[in-house]
Amino acid sequence: METIKAYLERKRDELGLLNGCLSTPRHVPCPRSVDEVIRTKFQLTAALRAEHALHDWKATETSWSATASPTSGPFTFSYDYQRADLKVNGPSFYEREHGCSSETIYTASGMAAISALLLAVTRIVAGADILVLPGSYGETLELIDRLVPELRLVTLSLTLGDALAGAGAPRILLLDSCVSAGAFEAALRCEGSGLDLLIFDTTCFAGRSGRIRRVLRWARRSGIPVVMVRSHTKLDSLGAEYGRLGSAVFVRGSEEGAGRSLSERLAAETRDVVRLLGSAALPAHFPPFVGTPDYWALTKRRVAAILRNGRHAARLFARELALLSAELHFTHGLYVTLRSRHPLDEAGARHAAEAMSRDLGRDGFPIRHAGSFGFDFAATEWFHNATTDEYSVRVAVPDLPTELWNDLAAAIAGWWRTHQPVTGE
């Protein structure tokens, strides 16, 4: 259990890390409240972005100045017109795996990364089946269904059996970090040697998560080439949403062979797709505070706090909202979803999320209606399960001191129970 005093001291260190990236750091005293933490954090990151623009004023889209040397903290960049040939040198957002080499292609968002990768796949792996687990990210499934028809979308059941075994067509597994814990574990219990490629969306896992290591070990045992795609807007900027940034990391084993060749070809093709779509990353969106030991230590502590709060919330909602809980055990542990007594559509779920945040915010709780997660406040938004076509309300668990979060979670349960329509209404 983390006390408010310990929490505010930890947040002082986070603010100090951000503040230390300014050329002229400000006087930032130890915060006295959660609201002050949130306000100061977003003010400091806004100042960092503004300072970046002023410092790198020559680093334009057309790269007209030969003296431009764009940087962002530990990251350095080189590129020509429209960043079509963007090269990035800097720290990894992941733990560097022993015995593996990799190539990283940065994009303007997580969806840009997976879009470019899937288009590249169609150029190299013809007529492939792409296997997805129930509950995979809805926009990714929509992307495949509507814009990448060359890939046959196959939604697996929770009892996977030999679903990952070899077949006539090439087989690609899309393993998404936003699926339920049961689905994720079921996949890792399967024999995967029949797969031709693993696309691993790590967005909902911390960059040094043990689950990422488990998946890479599983793939290595089965000899599966791996591409990790990620949105860095979520967990990689200390909850401050520094900028829109995504990546595709092509993980290669140490041995030569068909898998390594496929990885290299996919990387080259993906780089070309990013160029043609104009979806390369912006240097200004790379957080300048990434990569230091302090950054990793603070990130580890804040993600651990979110996961701890998530377990508390899951137990509370299972007890208090047993019939009104949609999913309490996502494998990432970062959010839960709540259902209504009567089916919701998108507008109804959005309205419920807005109303709950407004009402509980008026009561002084740190909760906002916001379409993301990993903040220092609870975030509510509508949620669509693309597998079941059901709408619910997502409650993203915040990095808050234990007692305050427990009080807020109880208030959420009370609000949700009170505002459900009565049976037969």
Image: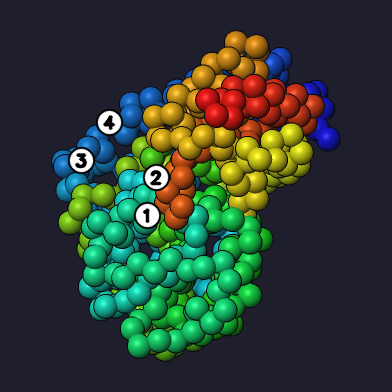
Residue drawn at x 37%, y 56% is 141
Amino acid type assigned to the residue bearing label 1 in the image: Thr
As measured in the structure, the alpha-carbon distance from the residue carrying label 3 to the one carrying label 1 is 29 Å
SS at badge 4 = loop
- Select label 4 or label 1 by which is in front: 1
Mark 4 burial class by Cα count in 10 Å: few <14, some 14-19, many 20+: few
Disc number at residue 61? 3
Q: Are marks 3 and 4 in contact (CB under 8 Å)?
A: no
Residue of label 2: 245
Q: Position of residue 420 (x, y in %)?
A: 58, 26
The answer to which of marks 4 and 1 sits earlier in the sequence is: 4
| Relative to 34, residue 254 above or below | below
Mark 1 burial class by Cα count in 10 Å: few <14, some 14-19, many 20+: some
SS at badge 3 = loop
| Relative to 140, residue 32 above or below | above
Residue of label 4: 57
Residue drawn at x 73%, y 27% is 410
The answer to which of marks 2 and 1 sits earlier in the sequence is: 1
Q: Position of residue 298 (x, y in %)?
A: 67, 40
Amino acid type assigned to the residue bearing label 4 in the image: Trp
Disc number at residue 140? 1
SS at badge 1 = helix
As measured in the structure, the alpha-carbon distance from the residue carrying label 4 to the one carrying label 1 is 36 Å
Residue drawn at x 46%, y 45% is 390
SS at badge 2 = loop
Q: Quadrant of the N terminus?
A: top right
The answer to which of marks 2 and 3 sits earlier in the sequence is: 3
Q: Position of residue 247 (x, y in %)?
A: 40, 55
